[in-house]
Image (tube, rainbow, N blue to C red):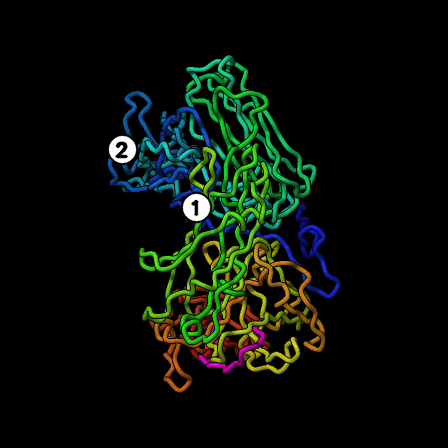
């Protein structure tokens, strides 16, 4: 599905609903690190950069993506084996030596002007040019070229009166001496198979993969940002380059085949027929990438096998590489393709297309009933068993033959590295009661964990348990995907989601409401809520909403138990990593008493969809409702998935979060000058430095926001404004602009 800039909203496929709830793709991959800061100069982009010489791998080359085999680039200047070299931008063409550190030149003709006071005339003498060898510091290797340049000054001399010549220097001359320090490293990591990580390794985006993990191609770069957000541009987006491979010992007679699995869309966005996934091989002697295969965009379908022989002699070289790249929209996480089981080996044949693997298909999410996390004190105090009696396990028999279910698995949890409790995963249940696992078949089974509750004797305000599941098979098997695990966290919140957003959704329309129902283990007091907002199509981080908590009346939101002051609304805050939840605490650190069943969400003050994360792997859509008529009528969500909203309860963790009682004295902050007509400076208590500061008008609209301690008000009209420090208990400040 292509994002067109002319559209107000982008809908994922045909998932729309007439009443005003929309879902869309995610436009930023937060799993990856933030975009690096700009270098010190646009003309010296190579200074303090690393250049790596990759190691060369031998066959077989195989990755089923159950683990991360992307090369990691540690930029440690002092690491063993790191060498460095200093390059200078200006050189003497004859000696190849660097010019003086203060050397500078201009490409504009400069001259000496002689003025005769007696005749009132002057003459100009153009300075002779100087040959300078100039390096291009925008890329490495550095390309040098010889230019004829002029001295960066003018000389003015007067004849007829006692005087000394005046030298006028050119301001900001075009060419000046600069230097760049380049660091070099040679890789030696045979466990890493891929040179880059533009494509995204994950466990959640594919539909019925054959094992844990796939690599997904979309419109996000290696840092998780759209290549060209807010545009309709289509072009090559992600690359996935293998390390160099040594194919020099082989010929076509050795029957080399390259195979992999591929699926369009998955749980992501449908690639259009004009989009594609492309495979290319590198011919070293030609220094060219050669097209060998491609797939046009299509709707989701089962993974299909691609099996290609390598026959051309130009590929049987040391330094052979393969790469995948996708062609599609550059504006976000769009036009998805997924690959798996990448395999290059000898002694294969045209019929050798099966991956004989017995593996987990998806990771487990929780051992709890209904929730992926609950407050530790709620779990401890619960008199009813809260363990799930239907933990979902999905496995795949990749063998071409039936396999006996006599081999089974296990599921257990540990605490601080020591196994606490667990039990077996019976083969009769894993195989859905069949005597054998059918060939090339996926099985989903459900298992009762009620006999092994989490031990409540551990002291502390929160706890984390490591949950591990194993399976086994009789035939020779890949061991890397026979085990899966996750951390069962008990903190101060309830959650339905698995922590991974595959889409973004929310209602549209001024005064629209979104509410999520929670049925908790006990009545308690809320102190706030955590939201996972994601950028999707348009940036709505300046749009306004009010946190709202409702009572539950016959399965619908009813009486307001809490709502933010309309003069101090909130805005979506985007984290600097993937799937980051931002805590929004109630105004004045209020504690809101809630019964065991309530709704929590927001009332939005703007038209646009706020783009809450939607986990499409766990379906709790029955807990989500929305209203577009002021809360009079509530509709159920039509989209399968779990809303990424987490109510935060008052626990012993309040102190570590900086939560204080209403009666406590709030920290003091200030701004100056006030009144102002220009720059406003902010003084914050140290614990709040780095928080987002909003400037609001009298209507409660956010005019600007910053994490700095000053901002400019020159363009704002005179009047009364307010400063609000997000994620804090600081009282708003009044600001007068004149």
Q: Which residue occupies the foreground of this view, 171 or 315?
A: 315
Q: Secondary structure at mark 2?
A: strand
Task: Check if residue 153 falls in the magenta segment.
Answer: no
For the question of whether residue 605 can be seen, the reply is yes
Residue 660's place in the image compared with 456, above or below, is: below
> Mark 1 and mark 2 in contact (Cβ < 8 Å)?
no
Q: How many residues crowd around disc 1 within 10 Å: few (fewer than 14), some, or many (20 or more)? A: some
Residue 441's place in the image compared with 350, above or below, is: below
Q: Residue at x 40, y 67 (%)?
A: 709
Whole-angstrom CA distance, mark 2 to mark 1, is 40 Å
Q: Which residue occupies the foreground of this view, 168 or 63?
A: 63
Quadrant position of residue 353 = top right
Residue at which label 1 appears: 483
Residue 336's place in the image compared with 128, above or below, is: below
Residue at which label 2 appears: 83
Quadrant position of residue 324 = top right
Task: Check if residue 585 falls in the magenta segment.
Answer: yes
Task: Name the spot of residue 560 as percent of width and height, x first.
Answer: 60, 81
Q: Which mark is residue 45?
A: none
Left of 508 or right of it: where is 389?
left
Q: Secondary structure at mark 1?
A: strand
Question: Magenta stretch?
Answer: 581-601
């Amino acid at each position: 599905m292509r994002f067109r800039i002319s559209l107000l909203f982008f809908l994922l496929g045909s998932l729309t609903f007439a009443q005003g709830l929309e879902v869309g793709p995610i436009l930023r991959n937060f799993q990856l690190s933030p975009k690096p800061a700009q270098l010190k100069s646009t003309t010296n982009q190579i200074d303090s950069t690393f250049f790596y010489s990759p190691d060369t791998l031998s066959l077989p080359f195989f990755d089923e993506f159950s683990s991360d085999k992307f090369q990691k680039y540690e930029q440690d200047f002092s690491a063993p084996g790191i060498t460095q070299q200093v390059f200078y931008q200006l050189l003497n063409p004859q000696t190849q030596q660097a010019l003086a550190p203060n050397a500078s030149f201009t490409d504009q003709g400069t001259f000496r002007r002689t003025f005769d006071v007696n005749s009132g005339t002057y003459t100009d003498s153009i300075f002779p040019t100087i040959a300078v060898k100039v390096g291009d510091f925008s890329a490495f290797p550095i390309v040098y070229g010889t230019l004829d340049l002029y001295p960066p000054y003018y000389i003015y001399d007067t004849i007829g009166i006692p005087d000394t010549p005046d030298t006028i220097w050119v301001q900001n001359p075009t060419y000046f001496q600069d230097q760049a320090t380049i660091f070099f490293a040679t890789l030696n990591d045979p466990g890493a198979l891929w040179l880059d990580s533009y494509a995204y390794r994950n466990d959640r985006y594919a539909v019925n993969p054959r094992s844990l993990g796939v690599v997904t191609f979309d419109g996000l770069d290696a840092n998780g940002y759209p290549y060209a957000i807010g545009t309709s541009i289509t072009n090559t987006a992600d690359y996935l380059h293998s390390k160099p491979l040594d194919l020099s010992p082989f010929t076509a007679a050795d029957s080399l085949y390259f195979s992999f699995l591929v699926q369009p869309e998955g749980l992501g966005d449908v690639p259009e027929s004009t989009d594609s996934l492309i495979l290319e091989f590198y011919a070293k002697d030609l220094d060219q990438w050669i097209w060998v295969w491609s797939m046009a965009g299509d709707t989701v379908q089962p993974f299909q096998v691609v099996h290609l022989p390598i026959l051309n002699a130009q590929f049987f070289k040391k330094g052979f590489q393969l790469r995948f790249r996708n062609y599609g929209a550059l504006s976000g996480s769009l036009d998805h393709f997924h690959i798996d089981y990448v395999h290059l080996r000898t002694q294969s044949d045209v019929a050798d297309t099966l991956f004989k693997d017995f593996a987990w298909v998806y990771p487990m999410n929780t051992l709890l009933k209904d929730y992926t996390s609950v407050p530790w004190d709620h779990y401890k105090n619960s008199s009813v068993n809260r363990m799930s009696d239907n933990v979902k396990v999905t496995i795949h028999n990749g063998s071409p033959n039936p396999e006996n279910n006599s081999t089974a698995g296990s599921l257990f949890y540990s605490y601080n590295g020591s196994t606490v409790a667990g039990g077996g995963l019976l083969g009769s249940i894993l195989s859905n009661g069949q005597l054998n696992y059918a060939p090339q078949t996926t099985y989903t089974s459900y298992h009762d964990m009620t006999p092994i509750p989490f031990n409540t004797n551990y002291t502390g305000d929160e706890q984390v348990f490591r949950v591990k599941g194993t399976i086994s098979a009789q035939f020779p098997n890949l061991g890397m995907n026979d085990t899966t695990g996750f951390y069962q966290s008990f903190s101060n919140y309830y959650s339905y989601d698995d922590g991974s957003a595959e889409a973004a959704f929310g209602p549209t329309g001024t005064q629209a409401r979104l509410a999520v129902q929670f049925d908790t283990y006990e009545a308690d007091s809320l102190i706030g809520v955590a939201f996972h907002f994601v950028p999707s199509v348009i940036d709505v981080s300046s749009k306004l909403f009010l946190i709202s908590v409702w009572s539950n009346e016959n399965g619908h939101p009813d009486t307001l138990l809490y709502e933010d002051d309309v003069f101090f609304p909130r805005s979506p805050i985007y984290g600097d990593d993937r799937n980051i939840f931002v805590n929004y605490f109630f105004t004045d650190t209020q504690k809101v008493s809630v019964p065991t069943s309530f709704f929590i969400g927001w009332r939005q003050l703007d038209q646009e969809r706020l783009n809450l994360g939607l986990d499409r792997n766990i379906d709790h859509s029955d807990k989500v409702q929305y209203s577009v008529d002021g809360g009079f009528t509530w509709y159920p969500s039509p989209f399968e998935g779990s809303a990424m909203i987490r109510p935060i309860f008052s626990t012993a963790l309040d102190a570590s979060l900086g939560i204080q009682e209403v009666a406590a004295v709030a920290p003091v902050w200030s701004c100056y000058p006030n009144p102002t007509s220009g720059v406003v400076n902010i003084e914050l208590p140290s614990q709040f430095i780095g928080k987002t500061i909003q400037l609001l008008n009298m209507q409660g609209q956010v005019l600007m926001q910053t994490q700095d301690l000053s901002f400019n008000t020159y363009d704002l009209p005179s009047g009364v404004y307010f400063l609000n420090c997000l994620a804090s208990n600081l009282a708003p400040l009044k600001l007068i602009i004149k």
